[in-house]
Amino acid sequence: MKLRHLRRGTQGLGIFLGILGITGIGMTHIIFPGLHCYACPLSVTVCPIGLLQNLVIVGSVPFYLFGVLAVYGLFLGRGWCGWFCPFGTVNDLLSWRKARFRKVLSPFKFLVLLGTVVAAWRLADTWFCKLCPAASLTASLPYFAMGLAQPTTPFFIHMGTLAATILGMALVARFWCRYLCPMGAILALFNRASFLGLHLDPQKCTGCGLCQKACPMGIDPHWEGNSTNCIKCGECVNACKQRALSLRFSLPGARGYAPLRIPWPRSRADRVFSGK
Amino acid sequence: MRYLLFLLAFAAVGVAQGIDLSPADPKDLGDWAQVAQPLRLYPTLSTPVRYEGPTLATRLFGEIFLGEAKYAILLGVSPQNEVALWVDFDGDLRLTSSEKLQGNRISGGSSWSFALKARPKGGEAYDYPLSVLWPEGRGYVFLVGGAPRSSTFHDHRVVLVDGDLNGVFGTKGDFLGVDVDGDGKIYADPDGHEYFALSEAFTLGDRSFKVREISPDGRRITVEETAYVPPKIPLIPGSPAPDFSFREFTSGQLLSLRSFRGKVVLLDFWATWCPPCMASLPGLRQIYAKFHAQGFEIVGVSLDESESDLRRVLADQGITWPVAFEGKRWDNTIAALYRVYQIPTSYLLDKNGAIRYRDLEGEELEKAVAELLAEKTAETPSLGALALPELPAKAEPILEIALPKEMQLRPGEESVIALRVSNTSPYLAEEVRFSVQGLPPEITAKLPEVFNLPAFGERTVRLSFSAEKLNPEIFPIPIKLGVEYHYCIADACFQMSQAAESALVLGERAGGGFVFPWWILVLLALGVLGSWFLWGRALSGFSIFILALAFAALGFGIYLGQARQAQRIAAILCTSCVGIEEERVPKVELSSELRAAFASLPKAGHLVLFYTPWCRACPYAKALVAEITKVNPRITVEMIDADIQREKAERAGVIVNGKAVVPAILVEETGKVLFGTGDLASRLLSALKELP
């Protein structure tokens, strides 16, 4: 229970950073470690995906952006999705149906990332921003309320993507984070090498499957912890009666920082989940 | 030897003569002693000036610099359509009712006259009389002045004029008018024979003099005798027109001006690219047809560069009179002989080959030709019938070019340099073309295409240099970037050429010296990929290694200014870029009702459009406001790049919670800001209806 309280606190911090503009400090040089639109009237940080597209359009080599993203990634990996990202928090709040993760859809977020970059490169436009549900929520709606945005086609497109994403989230927990988020895709690359990691004590694990039931991403954490789809939220740690799972900072690759890849064949895992 | 040098120096000092000058009334001197220069006005100034008075419908600020003194002015139009000018005489940045000047209505605008204190550095303060002319509805005024100072020198009157209106004498653009011929009248228009730039020598009798020193307050000049320079040929009524010979363009026949003796000749300097010249052609054709048989001839001197253009125009317009063409634009030798600095320029010569009139047109020209044809050959010309152009227009460079002091050239690569060219005048700069002088043959330069730059417009052009192999010893190579263009003020067109100096230096070849560290990012990517295949301690080490790379990339990015770049990108919100706004084509079709509604707006209004270069909806907003100002000239507009002039955007209230939102249109009078492009025309209409 303690871990979840802590997480709610850091998620609150993420939201706080997202709306720090309320203090009137204006835009800073900080790149947000999550998906949060810099067009949001109250944001003081730069959206990494928005910046990435702009840099592709203007054609500069993104040393700063990649450096910052790599530092973020090596620090928490996808832990940012579970512990900080405000849009992730929205996903969390709607996590009612923890369906199994569809492996076949896993590459989709990488395709979204690739498509975002290619669209910026070929069409010289920020196409992802025009569809991004996080922007719909934190920019389009506030500006509409302020009278700056008009009910035009782009506005309705934004509302459409937001509605579709919310529907997805209501039907499948962390729907956006699982299959679509390009920021999640970037952080996923670092997930295995990051300093925050999920640790499993194989001696204690009984293979009861409780962690899988608790996982909002729908993966089986005792096999797939720290994989591209693990957001290191710690729900599995809470769920584990045997205390076989733990979440802590250590050097990646240290003892217990395992398993790191899904074993193949999955016969053992299947036995575990079928309760045999 | 030392003593000899000392004596020589002493002798040189002895030859220098001081002239004390006192203020002169420009009315006694002639139009040339008053120089007109445009001054741009802005809705706000960088040093804000407080205005204390009744509400104004239009407020435009400007700054006048006279030496070290700076005066803010405010041009205000009251809701009752009364125009007034405020001048911050006491420099306290407050414009009070005591600083208000009532203007005189003149045709097409208003004018004010007053005197300010000029404070040149290194000189005493002095009174500087100035007039301000405002062409109604425009975002600029003309400053007219020059603070002429005069004296006599060897019984000839000498007048010093502050030709660049900066309050400091002796700077570029200032000039002397010297009554060389001692007739009591000075002809010091830029093509006059008594006009002398400060670097030019003037000749009195058989002695020539050159300015050596000028006190910044214009109280005293020192001249010294110099080698004899022949005096400039007068081009005033009564003086013989300088003779020249030329090859006629169509027939190839060799002709001279002298060969037309006994005929009345109109010597016309023109070019096909000069719209006023082209407009005068039908009138000339008519007069030519009417009087040619009686002994009237026209000699056209074309300042064109393109032979085909000239041939086409001659054929289209049915021009049969002789035309001289050299294809050298303003370097035409005949134009140089007649000191032509603007076109159209024309001289009407009588049967004796003497200049009788200048720049006549239409009916006046017809009357004069008839009068001269009626004269007998030996009749003495009457003086004083000079028809001078009305406005004392003076050709000034109007473009500003930001050229770096050094440009790097890498062998085997194309080095591209972006130059910002800005037009500082209210006139269109036409056919702006670049040239580079001083390049060795092994370097090739790719120059920007010829373009036009609108009033107060800005443009970034690309200049590129490339060379295969270079001898490093020839560097640095000093080069001169020349820019040539012409512009027209009303009926007068001027050709300008400006030059800026720079140097090409040898850049490092890629691979030697400083290398752009791409490898950091490549290693970072490889590291991230590699981390998926490692276990145990290897992964630990690897993670630390990529963390080091990440910090290196981050640090280098900060060094390159990319953190600032990121902040700038995020601090401006282009409404269409994030898709909270419709992106529209930069074409505007106003419905006839809207058009009529805009045209019927009775009040003058000033719109300030904030944009950024990458904003996709901004071109539409720009096109819309341009269309509105066309429909209703009482509405004026100013375009501001919110990325560059952020403080202005802040002051205008275009910043919403720290983010500049573009496109945004500020209605200057009411302070209302309209964001985005959705339904913009009708929103603008209702905002303009609220004008006080």
Image: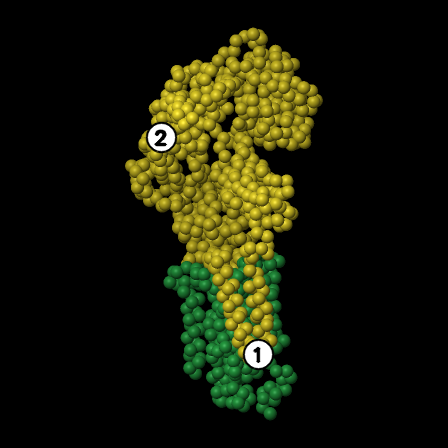
Chain colours: A green, B yellow
Disc 2 with disc 1 on a shared chain: yes
Q: How many marks?
A: 2
Seen from the viewer's position, the closer of residues A255 and A151 is A255
Residue at 41% across / 75% down in the picture?
A9
- Indicate the position of residue B87 as horizontal and vertical percent values: 34, 37
The label on residue B264 is: none
Q: Which residue is mark 2?
A: B217
- Indicate the position of residue B425 as horizontal and vertical percent values: 48, 37
Amino acid identity at mark 1: Trp
Viewed as shown, does residue A32 lie left or right of B257? left
Q: Which residue is mark 1?
A: B535
Amino acid identity at mark 2: Asp
Residue at 41% across / 68% down in the picture?
A16
- Indicate the position of residue B21 as horizontal and vertical percent values: 35, 24
The furthest residue to the bottom: A276
Residue at 55% across / 57% down in the picture?
B516
Residue at 56% across / 82% down in the picture?
A259
- Indicate the position of residue B142 as horizontal and vertical percent values: 43, 33
Q: Quadrant of residue B269?
A: top right
Whether A60 is drawn above or below B31: the answer is below
Residues at discs 2 and 1 in contact (Cβ within 8 Å): no
Mark 1 residue element: loop
Whether B165 is drawn above or below A34: the answer is above
Viewed as shown, does residue A234 lie left or right of B7? right
Whether A29 is drawn above or below B2: the answer is below
Is residue B159 visible in the rendered image? The answer is no
Q: Which of the two discs, 2 and 1, sits closer to the camera?
A: 1
Q: Which quadrant would the N terminus of chain A be assigned to in this image?
A: bottom left
